[in-house]
Each structure stands twice: as structure tokens, then as C-alpha cells.
Image: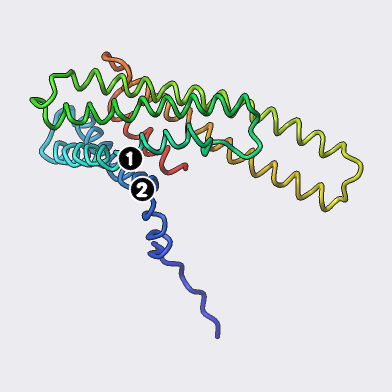
């Protein structure tokens, strides 16, 4: 008699492979941090006052956030490599899109040092005579440039895919199987770009919220927005 095996709640091997990459491990830490922060802010918002529990959740979230600064210390080097080698480009990107992606890499080359300087200002304020919050806002502004450029580059990629799709449908020297294979690959790429654009639009709110001195969104909504990004992606 066959028994249906219940899949485990956590595939340990798969998770170990996932978390072995710095960028993916950072997503995991970010989800925990924003999750605890969201709970803490929501508790305070619901009860109309801070409690020891809500402050505790927020404190843990804050410490995880600070730890993530350290994890991303190599981000500037990775961005420089992307600017130099076009490693952030798709293989079929036009030269125009490649130039846009290089500008994205440059924006992150600016972002990471500013982020690291602000980190030093936060943890060792007497070491550097700087306004850490101002530098942090400037880093977010550089991140905002990256997001805008990415939305633009992906919009062009969508147009290119639509054009390719039309050409494949009209191409007479293809078998039905070849045409179906090519159209499927375009659909998969389009779906991937949809997710990237969704991520960009979800990131836009927190990014612009953190880019200005007078924030315009409730903090608990920012935390929930960042959780949605991690879960969706």
C-alpha cells in the first residue's frame, strides 16, 4: 500500500544552498528584520503606545538592520565589476540598454560607500563628524536612481520582446515545435521581467520614504511593504 509522503516544511539542503550566497542570505535576514519590525510598529500603532514587547521587536529589527550593513560591505566591489564587465546585462540587451545598466551600476557604486559611511556614523558617531541620517538619505537617493533606470531598461526590454514575438509568429521557415519553443522562452522572460518591475514598484515607496528628511508614510506600512517584496520574490 502506497502512502503519500508529506513534504517537509523546510527543505534543509535547498535552504543551505540558497543561504550560501550573500545576496540570498541577506534576503532571509531582511525578511526576519522587517517582519519583527512590522510586528513591533503595528503593536504600538494598535495599542496607541509603546510596550516593552513592541520596543523589543523593534530593537531586534534595528540590530538586524545594522548587521546587514556589514554583510553588504562588498557591494561596491560587485557593482564596479558589473559596470566594468556588463555582468548585470542580459545577453541580448542592445547597446543602449547596456549603457543604462552601466549607469545603474554607477548609481550603486555611489550607494554602497554612502551606506557604509552612514553605518560608521551610526555606530561610532565620534569617529566621523558627519550627519549619518543625511548620508543615509543620500544613499537612498542613489538607490532611487537605480530603480528608475531599471524600470526604464525593463520597459525597453518588454518592447523588444513584443517585437521578437511578432517576428517569430510571422516567420514562415519555422516548424510548429520550433516556434512554440521560441515563444515559450519569450513568455518566461516576460514573466521574469514582470516580477522585476513589481519588485521595483514595491521598492519605490520605501526608497523615496527614506530619501527625504520628512517621511510621508507610516513606519509600519514601510515594514509590511518590504515583507511583501521578499515574499513575492
The reply to whether discs 1 and 2 touch (Cβ–Cβ < 8 Å) is yes
Above/below status of 191 relative to 202: below
Classify residue 83 as left or right of residue 226: right
Q: Number of marks in the image?
A: 2
Q: Which mark is residue 22?
A: 2
In the rendered image, the residue lying farthest to the bottom is 1
Q: Position of residue 156 (x, y in %)?
A: 64, 26
Residue extending farthest to the right is 172
Q: Is residue 110 left or right of residue 180?
A: left
The answer to which of marks 1 and 2 sits earlier in the sequence is: 2
Q: Quadrant of residue 40?
A: top left
Which quadrant: the N terminus? bottom right
Image position, residue 211 (x, y; %): 33, 19
- Secondary structure, mark 2, is helix
Element at label 1: helix
Horizontally, residue 114 falls left or right of residue 145, namely left
What residue is shown at x 18% (from left), y 27% (from top)? 48
Q: Given the current orientation, which residue lies at the most extreme front position? A: 84
Mark 2 residue crowding within 10 angstroms, few (<14) / some (14–19) / many (20+): few
Q: Nearer the viewer, residue 164 or 187?
A: 164
Q: CA separation, marks 1 and 2?
A: 10 Å
Which label lies toward us, 1 or 2? 1
Vertically, is 145 above or below 42?
Answer: above
Q: What numbered label is drawn on residue 28?
A: none
- Place of residue 130 in the rendered image (x, y in percent of width and height, measured from the top left): 17, 19
Disc on res. 74: 1
Question: In front: 233, or 170?
Answer: 170
Q: Pinpoint residue 193: horizontal percent, then vertical percent.
A: 58, 36
Q: Quadrant of residue 195?
A: top right
Residue drawn at 39 percent across, 51 percent down: 21
Q: Residues within 10 Å of mark 1 (few under 14, many from 20)?
A: few
Amino acid at each position: 500500500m502506497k502512502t503519500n509522503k508529506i513534504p517537509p516544511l523546510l527543505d534543509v539542503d535547498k535552504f543551505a544552498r540558497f543561504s550560501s550566497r550573500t545576496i540570498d542570505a541577506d534576503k532571509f535576514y531582511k525578511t526576519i528584520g522587517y517582519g519583527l519590525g512590522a510586528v513591533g510598529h503595528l503593536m504600538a500603532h494598535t495599542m496607541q503606545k509603546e510596550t516593552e514587547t513592541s520596543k523589543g521587536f523593534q530593537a531586534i529589527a534595528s540590530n538586524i538592520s545594522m548587521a546587514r550593513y556589514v554583510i553588504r560591505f562588498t557591494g561596491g566591489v560587485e557593482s564596479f565589476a558589473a559596470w566594468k564587465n556588463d555582468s548585470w546585462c542580459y545577453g541580448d540587451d542592445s547597446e543602449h540598454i547596456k549603457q543604462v545598466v552601466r549607469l545603474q551600476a554607477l548609481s550603486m557604486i555611489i550607494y554602497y560607500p554612502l551606506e557604509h559611511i552612514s553605518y560608521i556614523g551610526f555606530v561610532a558617531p565620534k569617529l566621523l563628524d558627519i550627519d549619518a541620517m543625511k548620508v543615509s538619505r543620500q544613499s537612498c537617493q542613489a538607490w532611487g536612481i537605480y530603480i528608475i533606470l531599471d524600470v526604464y531598461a525593463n520597459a525597453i526590454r518588454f518592447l523588444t520582446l513584443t517585437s521578437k514575438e511578432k517576428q517569430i509568429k510571422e516567420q514562415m521557415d519555422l516548424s510548429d515545435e520550433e516556434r512554440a519553443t521560441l515563444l515559450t522562452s519569450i513568455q518566461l522572460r516576460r514573466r521574469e521581467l514582470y516580477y522585476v518591475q513589481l519588485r521595483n514598484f514595491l521598492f519605490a515607496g520605501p526608497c523615496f520614504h527614506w530619501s527625504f528628511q520628512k517621511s510621508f508614510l507610516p513606519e509600519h506600512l514601510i515594514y509590511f511593504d518590504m515583507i511583501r517584496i521578499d515574499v513575492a520574490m
